[in-house]
Amino acid sequence: GNSVTQMEGPVTLSEEAFLTINCTYTATGYPSLFWYVQYPGEGLQLLLKATKADDKGSNKGFEATYRKETTSFHLEKGSVQVSDSAVYFCALSSLAGGTSYGKLTFGQGTILTVHP
Amino acid sequence: DADVTQTPRNRITKTGKRIMLECSQTKGHDRMYWYRQDPGLGLQLIYYSFDVKDINKGEISDGYSVSRQAQAKFSLSLESAIPNQTALYFCATSDLDEQFFGPGTRLTVL
């Protein structure tokens, strides 16, 4: 079955530091890959996505590249801000023919705290 | 106004009680989902629905039931709540593979 593994947290950084959160996956077929972010007290919201190998998703200074050869989708940001403090979830959606319900499989989440 | 709303936002109940969590959406999506979130476990899918006449079990459906009253409404019921159902519950809707989440319901079962 499908699975997503994220680096364990929590991750604590100083403002302007470089961020990497690792994500690897196991899936059949050709999944789409996502990063969702959950700010305190809120639901999840889509941060970025990539739908095929070598695609790069980007948003708000965050980037992730779909690497099929290493089954990875690592999240990076060059200079984090205090406002980036949140929980980050890697996820995949496998749209296999005949059952295209777009069910998401999530990683366990990584808590990021950024200090001034 | 929020596209996906959930009521109540917080609920404390006792073991054995029946409880219903409600979800409404204004995005016009056919697909709706219920997840629970436990610390360190990410989100686990409870039930999902492709349209009003289609309901499917997810990974952890035992102890839960759902009702799709209309395209815009999808409710989750706990027929007899137990303490290990204490969690944060999220409703979501989707078009194809991008999902849009509600703000969550924090449920505590004593």
Image (cartoon, coloured by chain):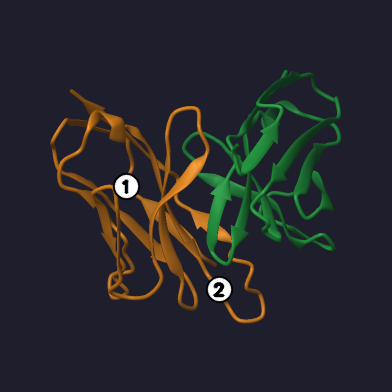
Query: Quick one: SS at disc 1?
Result: loop
Residue at which label 2 appears: A95
Give whichever of discs 1 and 2 has the lower sequence position.
1
Above or below residue B9? Residue B100 is: below
Chain B is which colour?
A: green
Q: Residue at x 74, y 49 (%)?
A: B61
Q: Is residue B88 left or right of residue B58?
A: left
Instruction: Specify the label residue A7 is tagged with.
Output: 1
Tell me the quarter of the image containing the C terminus of chain B.
Answer: top right
Give, as a three-letter code, the residue at label 2.
Answer: Leu
Residue with the most extreme bottom position: A97
Task: Say which chain tag 2 marks.
Answer: A
Residue with the most extreme front position: B1
Q: Is residue A30 left or right of residue B101?
A: left
Q: Position of residue A16 (x, y in %)?
A: 13, 35
Task: Say which chain tag 1 marks.
Answer: A
The answer to whether residue B62 of the structure is visible from this angle is: no
Near-viewer residue (B13 or A3): B13
Q: Position of residue A100 (x, y in %)?
A: 62, 73
Chain A is which colour?
A: orange
Q: Residue at x 64, y 67 (%)?
A: A101
